[in-house]
Amino acid sequence: MPTVAVINGSLRQASLNGRLARALALIAKPGLDLLTARIGDLPLYNQDMETELPAAVVRFKQEIAAADAVLFVTPEHNRSIPAALKNAIDWGTRPYGTSVWLDKPGAVIGTSGGAVGTAVAQTHLRGVLTSLGVALMGRPEAYIVFKEGLLDDADNVTDARAHKALSTYVEALTRWITRLT
Ligand code: FNR
């Protein structure tokens, strides 16, 4: 079963994007194994640290390298991607020549309560990831406006239309990974 490292751009415990990631993991079973790649313990990027890479960075890079694909699940912060997510992406490219992103199959998705459902953040994220050589799934796009009743307490998708849309997304991601690996 292909493994997918899931990076949540939100660090908070009750993250809606964390809940969306769990919902996707439930839908994806047994075709894909979605595993969380933590970014909250990564220090702020500082080139001085490259001489002796922090243990969290080594762990994070190994998790990405070992996965068949990466799924970015992200909120929108001030019409862009959260700083913590950009920090993780930057660490993944360093030291120069050791990027974990090059040719890695990837996809983006995200949720917020806002009307555009993270569309602006995802567009920024796509620009960054494309420049790093991530083999990014172009479509379907998924801008999820989080509404009460979308997920139950165990993060199953309870809204039928949303379940269909997210299932279509997961099927497309599975095909994308299978094609590229
Ligand atoms: C937000 N939020 C937000 N929402 C949005 O749709 N567009 C935006 O530009 C912003 N900007 C923004 C900035 C900052 C600093 C915060 C903390 C929040 C609201 C945001 O989408 C909402 O808090 C989500 O619940 C965040 O996702 P998690 O943390 O629940 O996964």
Image (tube, rainbow, N blue to C red):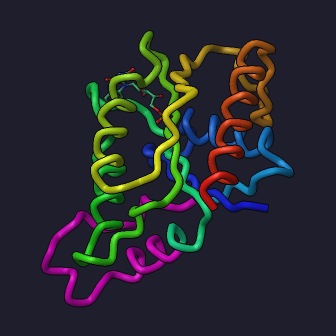
Which image quadrant is residue 103 in? bottom left
> Can you see residue 12?
no
Residue 15 vertical position relative to residue 66 in the rendered view, above or below: above
Which one is nearer the viewer's eye here, 59 or 147?
59
At x 54% / y 17%, what residue is drawn? 145
Give how far across and how far down residue 88 sits, in percent.
Answer: 35, 59
Which one is nearer the viewer's eye here, 156 or 71?
71
Residue farthest to the left, as pictured: 48
Q: In the image, ligand 1 is in what quadrant?
A: top left
- The stretch of residues the image draws in magenta is 36-62
Does residue 46 show up magenta in the picture? Answer: yes
Give how far across and how far down residue 35 sits, in percent.
Answer: 66, 59
Give how far across and how far down residue 69 sits, in percent.
Answer: 58, 57
Judged left or right of residue 120, residue 172 is right
Residue 166 vertical position relative to residue 11 in the rendered view, above or below: above
> Can you see residue 43?
yes
